[in-house]
Amino acid sequence: QVRLVESGGGLVQPGESLRLSCAASGNIFSIEGMGWYRQAPGKGREFVAFITSRGNTKITDSLAGRFTISSDHAKNTTYLHMDSLKPEDTAVYYCNADGKVSADEPFHSWGQGTQVTVSS
């Protein structure tokens, strides 16, 4: 079983920055990629960013320029850096990861989410 724990959320004012962290732990053989999604009140979950084990990244177009994703492979951790935050960025941010728990057994895990609230 692979567990993901997000941290770094909170209440910030418009224009401020936050860095979210997501740490994977458990029976990890390898991680192929880690990503972030978010779900605003009353809306569906939407893709935010993804990073592969080789460092290739994808940021949803509307957030590129304000959000960046990075990772620390040694710590099985991914980070979401969010700048110039806006009230519409308010959401629960979820981390996910894809990889293997053994040479033949894949996993796909989600974290519990961390709340980000942008308000003056």
Image (spheres, helix red, strand yellow):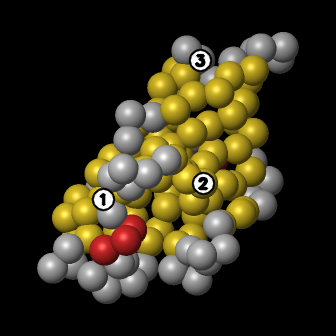
- Look at label 2 and name its amino acid: Phe
Within 10 Å of disc 2 (Cα), the crowding (few <14, some 14-19, many 20+) is some
Residue 87 disc label: none
Residue 70, quarter of picture: bottom right
**Where is residue 105 drawn, in percent x and y?**
77, 14
Residue 72 shows up from this direction: no
Query: Percent x, y for residue 12?
Result: 22, 72
The residue carrying mark 3 is: 27
Q: CA distance from mark 1 to mark 2?
A: 15 Å
- In the depicted structure, whether residue 13 falls above or below residue 95: below
Q: Which residue is mark 2?
A: 47
The quarter of the rendered structure image containing the N terminus is top right
> Residue pushed farthest left?
120
Occupied quadrant, residue 108: top right
Q: Residue at x 45, y 34 (%)?
A: 111
Whether the residues at callouts 1 and 2 have beta carbons within 8 Å, the answer is no
Q: Nearer the viewer, mark 1 or mark 3?
A: 1
Foreground of the two, 85 or 74: 85
75 or 10: nearer the eye? 10
> In terms of sequence position, does the residue under pointer 1 or pointer 3 come before the other?
3
**Image-based side of 98 in relation to 103, left or right:** left
